Each structure stands twice: as C-alpha cells, then as structure tokens.
Amino acid sequence: MTREDYADLLVPNVKYDRAYYEEKYPERNLDEKAIVTRYAPSPTGFIHIGALLQAFISSKMANQSNGIFFLRIEDTDQKRSIEDGVKLIIEDLSKFDINFDEGVTIDGEKGIYGPYTQSERADIYKAYIKDLIVKDLAYPCFCTEEENNEAREMQAAKKDRIGYYGRYAKCRRLHMEDVIEKVNNGEKFVVRLKSPGDFDKKYTFKDEIKGKMEFPENDQDVIILKSDGLPTYHFAHAIDDHLMHTTHVIRGDEWLSSVPIHTQLFRVLDFKVPKYAHISPLMKEDNGTRRKISKRKDPEAAVSYYHKEGIPNEAVRLYLETVANSNFEIWMNQNKDKDVSEFVLDFKKMPVGGTMFDYDKLINISKNYISKLKADEVYEFSLKHAKEYDEELYDLLTKYKDYSINVFNIEREQKKPRKDIACFSDVKNQVWYMFDELYNPENYEWQSITDKEEIKNVLDTYLNEYYNIEDDKDAWFNHMKEAAMKLGYAGDMKAYKENPEDYKGSIADFSTIVRVALTSKSMTPDLFEIMKLLGKDRMQKRVEMALQ
RNA sequence: GGCCUGUUGGUGAAGCGGUUAACACACAUGCCUUUCACGCAUGCAUUCACGAGUUCAAAUCUCGUACAGGUCACCA
C-alpha cells in the first residue's frame, strides 16, 4: 500500500487537495502595514467584558491600519455551542460599535475566504490532515481517553512531564499494517502531530505585546483531528489563519503558552507564521488576591451588566480604550477637540501583566460622558433604560416629555455642566423630587432649622411678596436677598461672616429653608431653575406639605 | 509539580541605566459659591515586593527568594 492509499484509508473522501485550497484563497492585496485580524469566538453564550476588550482592540488595530477585521466562528466543540450564539455575539458587539468587514453575518456571511464557520470547513481540514499523513508528519492514535488519563496520572506520580510525547507517544511507533488492521476493525482514532520539537531546546519569538519570549520547543504530539472528524483549536487556527491570510493573531493571553505548538504547526504545514499579540486578562480583586475576572463569579464580567446599570456603551468603550493603552487618557485631555477615533492604538503600550478592573474609573468616565450629552440625549437614554428596568419612571418620562427634558437641562448645556448622573439607573435618584407622582418625602433635611413658624414665615414672605414669575436669575436672587433681609437675614455672606450675631442667619440659611421646603433635600442643583420648572402653584402645594 | 509571565502610592498606571518617580481615579484640606456639584489650588510613593550582584550611577541590567497570574484536555 502506498502512503497515498494509506492516507486515503485514514481520511477518506477528501474532495480536493491542499493545492486546490491554496489557489482558491489567494493573498490579500493590501498595504504592507495593513493588519488583517479576526475575532474568533465560540458561540457559547453571552459576551464577556474581556472578550469585548479583545474584540475592541482587534477591530481598532485593523481599522486604523486600513486592514481587515473578520468574524470567524469556532464551533468545533459542538457540545458547548448554543443556538443563537452567533447572533448574540454580533448584536452585542455592534452595540459597542464593533463591526466586521468580513466573515459571519446575521444572515450568512460575506467575503471570499469562507466558509467562516469552522464546522463548515471540515473538508478543508481533512485535505491538510491527509497531506500531513502522506508526508509522515502526522499519525493516527488509537489511545482511549482512559488510557491517556492513566498515563497522565502515572507521569504525575513519577514527577515526569505530563503529556503525549517522546517515549510516551506509543501510537507514534505503530506499524502501518497494525494501523490498517485497526481501522478496518472500525476502531476510532484521532490524528496527532508528529512533533519534530525537542523540549531541551529553546524556542524564542516576539510577541507584539509582551516582547521577546522564550519557551522550550514543543515536543507534544498534540491532537490535530478529533475522532468526530473535526479539528482541535490548534489545527483549525493554523489552517484558517493561513488560508484567511491573517497577519496578526490577537487573542487572550491564556494562549501564550501554546504559541510553540502553533508556530510548529505552521512550519510543519509550510505556512508563513503570523504575528502574535496576547492580551492580558482583566483581573479582579477577590479577598486580597487578584484573579482573572470570571463570568461565573463576577456580575460585572457580563456585558449585559453595564446595560442594566445604564452605563452608556460609549463610556464602556472609552474605559476599554484606557485599559488597552493607558496613554489614551492623556491624549484625550490634550486633544479635546478631536474625535476619539483619531487616537492610534499601539501594541507596545498595552499592559503586559493583568489589568485590574477599575469600576470607579469606569463610573467616572461614564459620569463625564453623560455630563457632555445634551438634555434631549439624556432624556432618550433614560427613557430607553427606564423602559426596560423602571416602568414607573418610564411612564412619567413619556407623559412629561418636554418637562423631563427641561429637568435634565438644569445646569447642563454650559461650560461646566453638572456631573451628577453617573449612569442611567441613577436617574430616578437624581430627579424624583421634580415629579409630583414621586414626590413623597420621608424626611425633610432641615439641617439646624427646627422652628416651623420661622419656616412658614420665610416662605410666606418670599412667595407672597417677592416671588415674580418674570424674574431672570439675577432679579430672582435679588428678590431672595430682599426677602431675606426683610426678615432679618443677612443678604450678603461677607457681612454675615463679619457680624453673625447681628442676623438671624445668612442668605445661605434662607435659601436652604426655601430649598428644603420645595424639594425636601438640602442638596440640589440650582434653585432658580428648579423653581422655574415647578411653577408657583406646585411650589405653594409643596410648602403646605412641608409645613404639615 | 513542570513550563512561562508579572510584582511601581488606597486603586489603575507611565517610566525601561542618570527625572523633583508622569498622569488618571479615589481620598483629604482650602478657595469660589445661596446648598450640592462643577472648577481651581494644595496634600497624598524619601521610594519602585524582598535579598544579593554588576555599575561612577539601578524602579530600570543579572541572579536568588517570596507572592500573584496563566498554562499543561478528543475545550476553545
């Protein structure tokens, strides 16, 4: 039996040989500096903040170099794949403005390097597996899972290196006749790489992010084709990224230690080795130690968490950008007039160790972002958030649309806007007292003022004698002062500070009484604007409530 | 356990042989101000995990120790 026939027996029904595919997927005609990269998730569920970071970095690196960013679905583990997984990924990413030039789409795929879903590429992988077998660079292995587990335990007990290599690679030494017999008997097998590596030799390579790395050469005869006929990640990665002409493999740093396997595979297959960029994981502090943020334990790992909190997607994106390149913040401060898309991400400035996930900072970014929005934008965001999470607020915002926008406009469109909305789940807390339906104060923050008579006096005087609906802000404050002085308060802070004993209190105390009577809170945004929105009738009603 | 990587203020993080060790968040104080917030100003690492070495000079280079993370699947 020739090697060709032997390979055919092991990998039957291969339609085309590797030469066919090499020709079918030609080089991309792009600028030398263009980065071709991909986001290659398994459709196993919701998107995770770390995955979002990776997708964001990949997408930006490709875009800023006029390269290609494509989506490939790695569903070779069919047990873990879920229905709609792909749709979920595409939709989640597009909310963060991460879109693909090529690859899998909601209703199919685009691009000439497909199929972009690994389970649909079985024929392609087989062609290359067959080629390796013909060249004696790969071989079938009939070891069962139990046998492998036993071997591992034995190796562990002997404190030997774990794995399928060298003298432990027993199927490597199988004779062709034995293999043929086993196959003819219907025995299941996997295909392993016949690793040419030597563990005692060092292999060095340059990671775009981590710099120069040194590992022992790979000598593991890793599995490249599973018994179900689908390839393992390692093999699929080599074939796909070669055929799709990926220039940069950007992925999580859990892959770093597999690089020797991967580059060996590229060499054995006679492919050009791509560049690698391994992104450090997002960490979280947990009982004094840091660990990789986990989907299981940490609610903030799921991207849906930010949606629920009402942190704008754009803020999350900005935060991820500061994580990706910490000089981004400095750049942004120096280039306030420029669009953030002009910032150029640099692999060399990405963190090498794990990055602590800093929620406070995210909130700060969110707060700043929201403060720069126009009132009607804040309204739209709030409405959208409330629609999903707070029916009561949603109804009010809908019913009083213009009024609500005015409320959001208090101390907004100005040079130094207020920054008190950190996220949209916070909105109700910030504005409840502006809606009569929500206005049901449990306690009035009267501070040191306890005399109800005095409170009544202050409000009657101001509202009846000095309040004027026509007032602009200066006139309004003058009226406040006049009313205050009439009752023996100091209209001027300096005068009060010089001789406090001459007065009942200061204009600040006077304002506080008015403020608390109208809102129940001692801390609010600008009182003048609040009064303007409340109008005289509602003010009168609130004063009555306060005096009860 | 083997192999790899990392360790700079309360937090994130720059710096990569000679700097007053950036910057941001948080915190504190003061100013401004009718409150709060904003803004502004100031303070917050005599020191870069620890120990040794190389050097005129080390956070930066080398080695060791400790701690942390990653990885060792017919999962990606």
Image (spheres, helix red, strand yellow):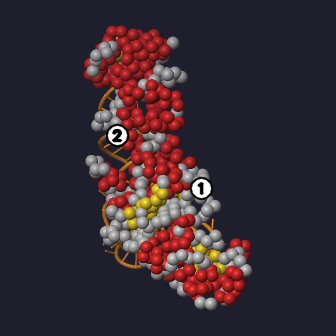
Q: Position of residue B59 (x, y in %)?
A: 41, 67
Q: Which of A34 and A469 is in front in this view?
A: A34
* Residue lying at the far bottom of the rendered structure: A1
Residue A195 as seen in the image, left or right of residue A486: right
Q: Name the residue under label 2.
A: A372
At label 2, counting other C-alpha atoms closer than 10 Å, the crowd grade (few under 14, some 14-19, many 20 or more) is some
Question: Is A192 drawn above or below residue A495 in the view shown?
Answer: below
What amino acid type should be assigned to the residue bearing mark 1? Ile
Residue visible at 46% across and 37% down? A384
Q: Mark 1 points at which residue?
A: A82
Q: In which quarter of the image is residue A290?
A: bottom right
Question: Is A511 drawn above or below residue A99 in the view shown?
Answer: above
Q: Where is residue A23 in the image (x, y as percent from the top left)?
A: 42, 76
Residue visible at 48% across and 48% down? A359
What amino acid type should be assigned to the residue bearing mark 2? Lys
Asked which secondary structure carries label 1, the reply is loop
Asked which secondary structure carries label 2, the reply is loop
Residue visible at 48% across and 57% down? A108
Give the total number of marks visible in the rendering.
2
Q: Mark 2 lies on which chain?
A: A
Mark number displayed over residue A460:
none
First reached walking from the N terminus: tag 2 or tag 1:
1
Q: Which chain carries label 1?
A: A
Residue A508 as seen in the image, left or right of residue A11: left
